[in-house]
């Protein structure tokens, strides 16, 4: 049995293929009404998508909109790999968010 590679070890083409596979798995899970399984698959997809982005383009001190929460801004305090750490505009709690869930406001 082959040991699965970490997303950080995959090439861009392998990540694109993995996202395609996860999309297929998500459709099947949704059709079978497996909500918990669907949530896990969607989180895996977000992680894989984050590895396709350039983390250096996410700048500490700048604000980004949360894709899953339109209108809510996220101020990056620092970066750790593909995770942006900081605060939502609606909370003081420091959290880490995969960069695939962030976008520049107004884009």
Image: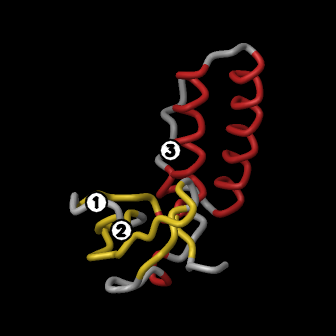
- Quarter of image, res 37: top right
Residue at 38 percent of width and 63 percent of height: 83
Q: Which residue is mark 1?
A: 91
Residue positioned most to the left? 93
The Cα–Cα distance between marks 2 and 1, rounded to whole angstroms, is 6 Å
Q: Position of residue 60 (x, y in %)?
A: 33, 83
The residue closer to the viewer here, 51 or 99, is 99
**Mark linked to residue 89:** 2
The Cα–Cα distance between marks 3 and 2, rounded to whole angstroms, is 36 Å
Q: CB atoms at circles 3 and 2 under 8 Å apart?
A: no
Query: Is the residue 83 above or below the residue 34 in the image?
Result: below
Q: Position of residue 17 (x, y in %)?
A: 73, 48
The residue closer to the viewer here, 1 or 77, is 77
**Image quadrant in which the C terminus is located:** bottom right
In the image, is 6 to the left or to the right of 35? left
Residue at 32 percent of width and 86 percent of height: 61
Residue positioned most to the top? 32
Q: CB atoms at circles 2 and 1 under 8 Å apart?
A: yes
Q: Which residue is mark 3?
A: 5
Classify mark 1: helix, strand or loop: loop
**Image quadrant in which the N terminus is located:** top right
Give neighbour class at mark 3: few <14, some 14-19, many 20+ (Cα, 10 Å). few
Q: Position of residue 63 (x, y in %)?
A: 42, 80
Classify mark 3: helix, strand or loop: loop
Looking at the rendered image, the disc whose residue lies closer to the viewer, 3 or 1, is 1
């Amino acid at each position: 049995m082959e040991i699965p590679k970490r997303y950080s070890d995959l090439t861009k083409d392998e990540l694109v293929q993995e996202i395609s596979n996860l999309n297929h798995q998500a459709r099947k899970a949704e059709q079978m009404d497996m909500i918990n399984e669907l949530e896990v698959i969607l989180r895996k997809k977000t992680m894989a998508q984050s590895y396709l982005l350039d983390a250096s383009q996410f700048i500490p001190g700048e604000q980004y909109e949360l894709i899953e929460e339109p209108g809510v801004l996220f101020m990056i305090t620092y970066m750790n790999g593909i995770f942006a750490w900081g605060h939502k505009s609606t909370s003081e709690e420091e959290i880490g968010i995969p960069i695939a869930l962030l976008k520049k406001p107004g884009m």
